[in-house]
Image (cartoon, rainbow, N blue to C red):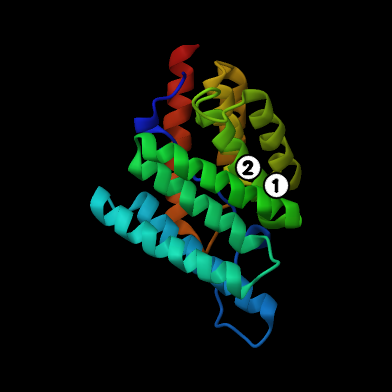
């Protein structure tokens, strides 16, 4: 088993791209599209604070539970839309990383179902974030008989995410992280360096700063193995 459940998915998180490259942050209008964008932006903003700013585990879990409830409301509000389901899956995955232990695997399975539903509706939304997030689960979760982990499936999904988000920071980061886990260090560094070249998302500074730190740490780790 490559990863212990206690540390499962600490880097997830998946993951995750902004709506159509960047989510609009203007005041909601009467149009459903604008309301959807605004709701997704609110999930992204709160997620970034929990993921990269809050350090107390108990408070993180309280905050992530509240955010999951909010995501569930948005699923109902925007029924038939893939975007809220993608972020719902990402948030549940993040809770798995915070919680750790045996309970994390159940959360990963829950996130998997949510992301699969999102992809079934429309896998192209959010620059393919559904594929990227699901792919990250497949290579970080233990394989049979403990979990559903599958490196071949992970690579297939991550490449699908890159197909729809070739210049997305998260799609490139998670592909690099997968390559790192496969001990393909030079290829991993190339993917990480491409992720660093992506333009900053003006409305997601906390997420960008946190992700770029993870990328630089991963590059250093890969170079140590060469």
Q: Does residue 179 appear to the left or right of 51 in the view shown?
A: right
Give the residue displayed 50% in from the left and 11% down from the top. 226
Give the residue displayed 62% in from the left and 22% down from the top. 187
Image quadrant assignment for residue 19: bottom right
Q: Is residue 198 visible?
A: no
Residue that badge 1 annotates: 165
Residue neighbourhood size for the residue with mark 1, other residues' Cα within 10 Å, grouped as few (<14), some (14–19), many (≥20): many
Residue farthest along the front direction in this orientation: 145
Query: Could you tell me residue 182's position as x and y percent?
Result: 57, 18
Give the residue displayed 64% in from the left and 61% down from the top. 83
Closer to the chain start, of discs 2 and 1, is 2
- Please count the marks in the image: 2
Q: Does residue 54 appear to the left or right of 15 in the view shown?
A: left
Residue that badge 2 annotates: 132
Query: Could you tell me residue 52's position as x and y percent?
Result: 37, 50
Query: Could you tell me residue 11's position as x and y percent?
Result: 44, 38
Q: CA distance from mark 2 to mark 1?
A: 9 Å
Question: Camera-side residue: 20 or 189?
Answer: 20
In the displayed structure, 107 sits above or below 31; it is above
Image quadrant assignment for residue 213: top left
Give the residue displayed 55% in from the left and 52% down from the top. 89
């Amino acid at each position: 088993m490559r990863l212990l459940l206690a540390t499962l998915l600490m880097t997830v998180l998946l993951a995750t791209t902004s709506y159509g490259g960047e989510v609009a942050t203007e005041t909601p209008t009467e149009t459903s599209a604008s309301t959807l964008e605004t709701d997704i932006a609110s999930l992204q903003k709160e997620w970034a604070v929990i993921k990269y700013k809050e350090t107390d585990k108990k408070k993180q879990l309280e905050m992530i539970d509240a955010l999951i409830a909010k995501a569930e409301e948005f699923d109902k509000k925007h029924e038939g839309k893939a975007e809220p389901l993608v972020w719902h899956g990402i948030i549940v995955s993040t809770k798995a990383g915070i919680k750790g232990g045996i309970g994390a695997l159940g959360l990963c399975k829950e996130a998997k179902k949510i992301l699969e539903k999102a992809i079934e509706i429309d896998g192209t939304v959010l620059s393919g974030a559904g594929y990227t997030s699901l792919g990250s689960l497949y290579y970080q979760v233990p394989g049979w008989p403990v979990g559903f982990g599958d490196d071949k499936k992970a690579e297939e999904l991550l490449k699908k995410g890159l197909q729809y988000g070739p210049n997305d920071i998260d799609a490139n980061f998670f592909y690099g992280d997968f390559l790192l886990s496969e001990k393909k260090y030079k290829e991993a560094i190339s993917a990480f360096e491409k992720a660093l070249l992506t333009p900053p998302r003006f409305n997601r500074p906390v997420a960008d700063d946190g992700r770029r730190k993870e990328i630089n740490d991963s590059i250093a780790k890969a170079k140590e193995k060469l």
